[in-house]
Amino acid sequence: MKRYWLYLFISIILFPLVTCKEEKKKMSDKDIGEQKEIMVRVNKYLVKKDVELIESYIDRREWEMEVTESGLFYQIYEHGNGKPAESGRYATINYMVSLLDGTICYDSDETGPKQFLIGRSNEESGLEQGVLMMRVGDKARFIMPPHLAHGLLGDERNIPPRSIIVYEVELLEISD
């Protein structure tokens, strides 16, 4: 009788482990391909919805903005006559970062100007792309979809997951 309980106990414990292992083996290349295709469709849908939100936001404000191939919306609304920004040089900017609902996340009035090495920093890729289109003295606004900003997780402080952010930027200085 003790053996019966021992076998029953072992069966109950091992069955789920063996079953899970077998299920993993059963996933074919076709199943994996189908899962990837679903993820691609979901991503395309989310990007499309982000673009619709951004375009609606721009229309309500009657801004004239352009968009890059990467999806960065930008407008240089005041032109300076200083040095152009270049990769490998330091940019110093005044900035304000907000969400589409108007919530201000970060502002150089509170934190001071931001300085970063263009092309080698941990700044948002959308910010680096935008600054590279500027000259010292320019003022611009950039609207960054999540993939050019803080992605799926946000910044874990002031920017929520999958947020579209708006940057107001003034390029103060380019230096070595």
Image: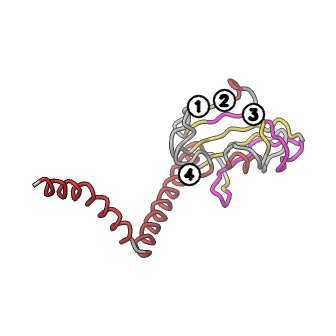
Nearer the N terminus, badge 3 or badge 4?
4
Q: Which of pointers 3 and 4 indicates the residue nearer the eye?
A: 3
Q: Amino acid at mark 3?
A: Lys
Give the foreground label among 1 and 3.
3
The structure residue drawn at horizontal position 73% and vertical position 42%, both measured from the top left corner, is 140
Q: Give the SS element for disc 3.
A: strand
Q: Which residue is mark 2?
A: 107
- Highlighted range, magenta: 68-97
- Where in the figure is residue 42, as x and y percent of width and height? 45, 60
- Disc on res. 114: 3
**Could you tell me residue 165's position as x and y percent?**
59, 42
Instruction: Give the Cα separation between the discs numbered 2 and 3.
Output: 10 Å
Q: Magenta span has 137?
A: no
Give the residue at mark 1.
104
Report if the CB atoms under discs 3 and 4 are less than 8 Å apart: no
Which residue matches tag 4? 55
Residue 170 sits above or below residue 4 on the image: above
